[in-house]
Amino acid sequence: MTTKQRFRNNKYRLEVRERDHGPAHCHLVGGEVDVIIYFDTLATDGAWPRGLRAEVMQWVEVNLADLWREWHIWHR
């Protein structure tokens, strides 16, 4: 698992996990939160912490190419 970015004073982290199920995605985790963000559509699954979605999705969109590369490293 690789933590790609942390949000809200390290309370939440964005992870790409090795040998995870497809389709390509990352997880936003922290406490009881586990939101899945799919790379191909940027659709999400899970309950977002209040006010965090826009910040995380902006970061994902800017760094999507890096997230894809990381996914391919772990899922050859």
Image (spheres, rainbow, N blue to C red):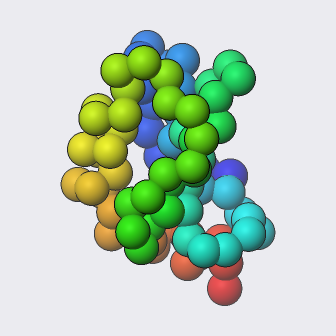
Q: Residue furthest bottom?
A: 76
**Percent position of residue 18, x then y:** 71, 63
How many numbered discs, if any? 0
Q: Quadrant of residue 7?
A: top left
Q: Residue furthest top?
A: 9
Residue name at image x 28 percent, y 35 percent: 54
Residue name at image x 49 percent, y 51 percent: 44
Residue closest to the eye, 27 or 5: 27
Is 43 rendered above or below residue 15?
below
Tell me if residue 63 can be seen: yes
Tell me if residue 15 can be seen: no
**Percent position of residue 48, x then y:** 50, 30
Q: Quadrant of residue 68?
A: bottom left
Residue name at image x 70 percent, y 23 percent: 32
Q: Does residue 61 appear left or right of residue 3 in this picture? A: left
**Percent position of residue 74, x then y:** 65, 71
Q: Does residue 40 appear left or right of residue 31 in this picture? A: left
Is 34 rendered above or below residue 9?
below
Residue name at image x 49 percent, y 22 percent: 49
Q: Quadrant of the C terminus?
A: bottom right
Is 7 rendered above or below residue 68?
above
Is 43 rendered above or below residue 75?
above
Q: Does residue 37 appear left or right of residue 27 in this picture? A: left
**Percent position of residue 50, x then y:** 42, 18
